[in-house]
């Protein structure tokens, strides 16, 4: 069995940093301590930061949207992930209307199996709530799927408030949790219809037809449903200050709500939508990019620990795919890549700019998603007994984000040209070197992760 000692590094956890060696044996970390000795290969990692493998709990690989399919499947998407230090993704297995959850889950297993270069788990996105779907819930838990996703918007996915309430109530008995895409479908739908009818067809109308209050209203409603169901819940991809204020209000009212945001809402703003079509269509995602005040509120939420995770909503399309909406912005497939760049962006623009601490970076990218999604301490920890998913990070490196260095098949990089500090030097996936100095060196060994219950305290 392979044995490696990572010697002399600085281990990072949500509780701070410490100097210690790690002994890896096979797929596991077996010892953590000073001056470890063993009959093992020794890798000198002095001067490096050692993180538990990052978790991206919000990816869409190989997803059909708007009559097309994402540019990144599990092959390309998970290679981009491992290059970003992500050793586990939680992708959204998505039920098509009329389909059973079992069929949807099997479909996602087929997409991911033998194609993934990092470990993977699935949330189940429910688009069709019926009695027979309720009866399938125990089977999902038996198969390690313990988190569910609902959408308050999108014709193909939208669930009624009643359906969301019933799902939340049903999941309570199994200890499951529901995440929600919160936007007011009626208002956004009407504003989009009016815009197109008035010849307002360019991408600049995308954010204008999804104003901040449409997110805030939906968050308020979703959290009222959670209150009525007395069930824990998650807001995914929070983008607005107004929505954040709804979260704080609901928490005061006793709602157990966890919140995710994404780098695009922290670092980009809606000025990009005024660029020519090809440049602005890249940034069409929902919710849209917002104002600087919104980003500031989200950074404050991270700094104060009131937000809980940073994932990416990686959902990539090529420019050619985006051109489906050249005459009508509502036809542009929504989403952008992010799985490869999240960690370096959070280090550069979060830690180095003192907006968050190194310990918080570890919480938001590793431990919190591991706990929230029932994978801790197998994942998200540098402890004896944890999977040896490890990121060796050189704080002295620097670089620039470019499409050339991106492994996403979408062909562009939303954060193009942004300077970065630090460098992912090596990534270990369950004890095996998977990425080194810019190259993915281990392909398609990713395994499915069966998950249990949320253990993240608010
Ligand atoms: O625009 C986005 N975010 N597309 C991905 C699907 C979703 O809404 O999360
Ligand atoms: Zn969404
Ligand atoms: Zn998403």
Image: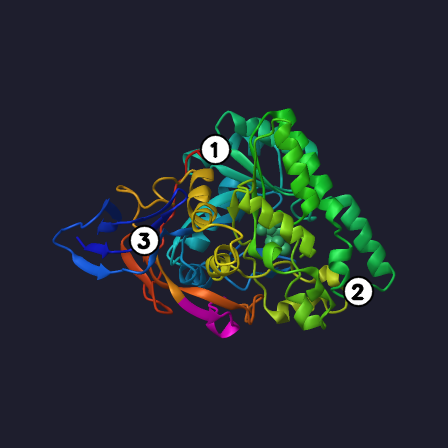
Q: Residue at x 46, y 71 (%)?
A: 399
Instruction: Kindly give the residue lying farthest to the left in the view shown.
Output: 39
Among the two numbered marks 3 and 1 on one chain, the one whose residue lies closer to the N terminus: 3
Element at badge 3?
Answer: strand
Quadrant housing residue 319: bottom right
129 horizontally vs 196: left or right: left
Q: Is residue 402 magenta?
A: yes
Quadrant housing residue 395: bottom left
Q: CA distance from mark 3 to mark 1?
A: 26 Å
226 horizontally vs 275: left or right: left
Q: Identify residue for label 3.
A: 10
Nearest the eye: 231 or 301: 301
Part of the protein shown in magenta? 397-408
Q: Position of residue 364 (x, y in %)?
A: 48, 47
Q: Position of residue 207 (x, y in %)?
A: 73, 57
Closer mark to the observer between disc 1 and disc 2: 1
Mark 2: few, some, or many residues within 10 Å (few <14, many ≥20)?
some
User: Image height check: is 63 above or below 150?
Assistant: below
Label number found at residue 457: 1
Q: Identify residue for label 2.
A: 201
User: Image height check: is 322 above or below 216?
Assistant: below
Q: Residue at x 12, y 53 (%)?
A: 39
Q: Position of residue 261 (x, y in %)?
A: 57, 49
Q: Position of residue 380 (x, y in %)?
A: 38, 45
Element at badge 1?
Answer: loop
Among the two numbered marks 1 and 2 on one chain, the one whose residue lies closer to the N terminus: 2
Q: Residue at x 70, y 35 (%)?
A: 221
């Amino acid at each position: 069995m392979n044995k490696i000692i990572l010697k002399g590094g600085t281990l990072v956890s949500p509780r701070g940093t410490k100097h210690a060696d790690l002994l890896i044996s096979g797929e596991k970390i077996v010892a953590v301590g000073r001056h470890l000795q063993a009959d093992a290969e020794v890798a000198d990692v002095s001067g490096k930061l050692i993180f538990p493998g990052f978790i991206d709990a919000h990816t869409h690989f190989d997803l059909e949207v708007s009559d097309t399919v994402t540019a990144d499947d599990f092959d390309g998407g998970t290679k981009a992930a491992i290059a970003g230090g992500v050793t586990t993704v939680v992708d959204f297995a998505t039920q098509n209307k009329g389909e059973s959850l079992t069929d949807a889950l099997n479909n996602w297993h087929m997409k991911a199996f033998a194609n993934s270069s990092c470990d993977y788990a699935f949330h189940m996105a429910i688009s069709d709530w019926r009695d027979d779907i309720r009866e399938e819930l125990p089977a999902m838990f038996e198969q390690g799927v313990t988190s569910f996703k609902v959408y308050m918007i999108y014709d193909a996915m939208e669930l009624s408030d009643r359906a969301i309430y019933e799902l939340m109530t049903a999941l309570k008995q199994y200890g499951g949790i529901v995440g929600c895409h919160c936007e007011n479908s009626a208002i956004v739908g009407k504003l989009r219809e009016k815009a197109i009818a008035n010849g307002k067809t360019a991408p600049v109308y995308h954010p204008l037809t999804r104003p901040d209050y449409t997110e805030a209203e939906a968050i308020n409603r979703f959290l009222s449903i959670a209150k009525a169901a007395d069930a824990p819940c998650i807001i995914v991809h929070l983008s607005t200050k107004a929505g954040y204020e709804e979260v704080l209000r609901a928490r005061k009212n006793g709602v157990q709500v966890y919140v995710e945001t994404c780098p695009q809402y922290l670092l980009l703003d809606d000025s990009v939508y005024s660029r020519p079509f090809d440049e602005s269509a890249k940034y069409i995602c929902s919710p849209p990019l917002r104002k600087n005040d919104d980003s500031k509120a989200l950074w404050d939420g991270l700094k104060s620990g009131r937000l809980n995770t940073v994932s990416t909503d990686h959902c990539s399309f090529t420019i050619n795919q985006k051109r489906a909406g050249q005459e009508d912005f509502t036809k542009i497939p929504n989403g952008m890549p992010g799985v490869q760049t999240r960690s370096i962006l959070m280090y550069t623009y979060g830690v180095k700019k003192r907006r968050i601490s190194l310990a918080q970076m570890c919480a938001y990218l590793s431990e919190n998603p591991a706990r929230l999604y029932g994978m801790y301490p197998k994942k998200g920890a540098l402890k004896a007994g944890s999977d040896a998913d490890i990121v060796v990070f050189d704080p002295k490196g620097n670089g620039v984000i470019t499409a050339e260095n991106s492994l996403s098949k979408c062909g562009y990089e939303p954060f193009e040209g942004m300077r970065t500090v630090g460098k992912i030097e090596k990534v270990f996936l369950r004890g095996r070197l998977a990425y080194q100095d810019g190259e993915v060196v281990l392909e398609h060994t990713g395994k499915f992760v069966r998950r249990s219950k949320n253990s993240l305290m608010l």
